[in-house]
Amino acid sequence: MGDFFYKLKKDKIPFLAFIVLLILYLLIAFADFFAIYPSTYSNRKLAYQPPSKIYILDKDNKLKKPYVYNYIKTFNQNTLSIEYKQDRENKYKIKFFSHGYEYKLFNLIKTDIHLISKPDDCNLFLLGTDIGGHDVYSRLFFGGQISLTIGFLALLISFPIGAIYGGVSGYLGGIYDKILMRISEAIMSIPGFYLLIILASILPSNMNSQQRFTLITAILALIGWAGFSRVIRGMVLSVKNQEYIKSIETIGASKKRIILKHILPQTSSYIIIAITLSVPSYILAESGLSFLGLGIQLPDASWGNMLREAQEFANILYRPWLLVPGILIFIAVLSFNVLGDKIRDILDPKTMK
């Protein structure tokens, strides 16, 4: 393990990708601590309020504790549009490590301490609000909990199925191998994303987001194991004829023990690589469904449904803060791909010394 991290550190870009992913997962693990408002917060009267500007200098250019001004909502009769203007009469100091809304850390520890808390009698929206008056900054953390974890939950289902299925198929061979591989090929021929769209569109409208999240994860897993099983089957075919496997068979070991204890562990390097490279596809699948309105539904957040408003050209021009979820999706997917390529190089027997 120490040698693995040493090789990872030597290449700065993959190591940076590893650090970025580590930071992202730490942020979503402590989402309530970093968030200013709860996930259910909404104030439609403050729709599309721009990000709060933070000041650290007063009029005399003297350093002060970070403070903000409140926004006043006005209607411009000339342009027939709603505008927000800063009320410069009162300053509001930002609170750090202060009390806010109450939450349970990891659903165990009850607390109300937050990294940043809004000042009294003042709204604080570090990344503005969306059309529903949700705080974009806070929802990024809660949305990331879904978008960044759905891949690993799907892998917990698909990879064990694929590994065992491919291992059994490759080891038994013959007619069993042909039947099992034809089944997996039939599943691989199903267009996964379109299947997700069809299934998501026919779901009952009264399903909550947790039920949708579970169902999307299960569907992604059930259509994702087939391709993985074929690769495992090919690796097993090359391993099962080695002398030590023949020796184990000679002493009377059961087929189950040979597959689980001696053959599948030989594929562990590939499994680690495949996990790292597969997570981005699951993130994009969930984000794509939520972006189309077929995944996680409001008021719950995911980076996909947060990005929906950015499809309007006017929002891109005048409310660029709505693009932030898309930027985070790009960063997460790119980091996984870069890290996965490096792990493949490290664990590839041809490159290991």
Image: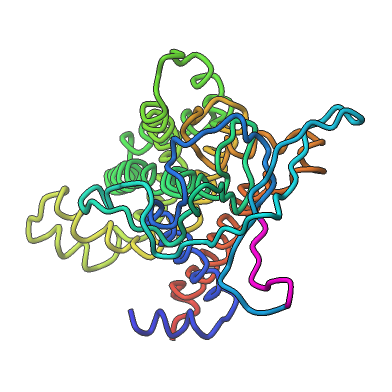
**Image position, residue 75 (x, y; %):** 79, 31
Query: Which residue is at 67% across, 41% downward?
Result: 49
Residue 322 visible in rendering: yes
> Can see residue 228?
no
Seen in the picture, residue 282 relative to 58 is either above or below; the reply is above
The image shows residue 58 at horizontal and vertical percentages of 68, 71
Left or right of 208? Residue 43 is: right
* 132 relative to 154 in the view: left or right: right
57 falls in the magenta region: yes
How far across and how far down the image is residue 314, in percent?
81, 36
Q: Residue at x 36, y 26 (%)?
A: 211
**319 or 115: nearer the viewer:** 115
Identified at 54% across, 46% down, the residue is 281
107 vs 292, left or right, is left
Rendering quarter of residue 334? bottom right
Which segment did they paint magenta?
53-60
Residue 221 lies in quadrant: top left
Name the residue furthest left: 252
x then y, percent, for residue 77? 87, 28
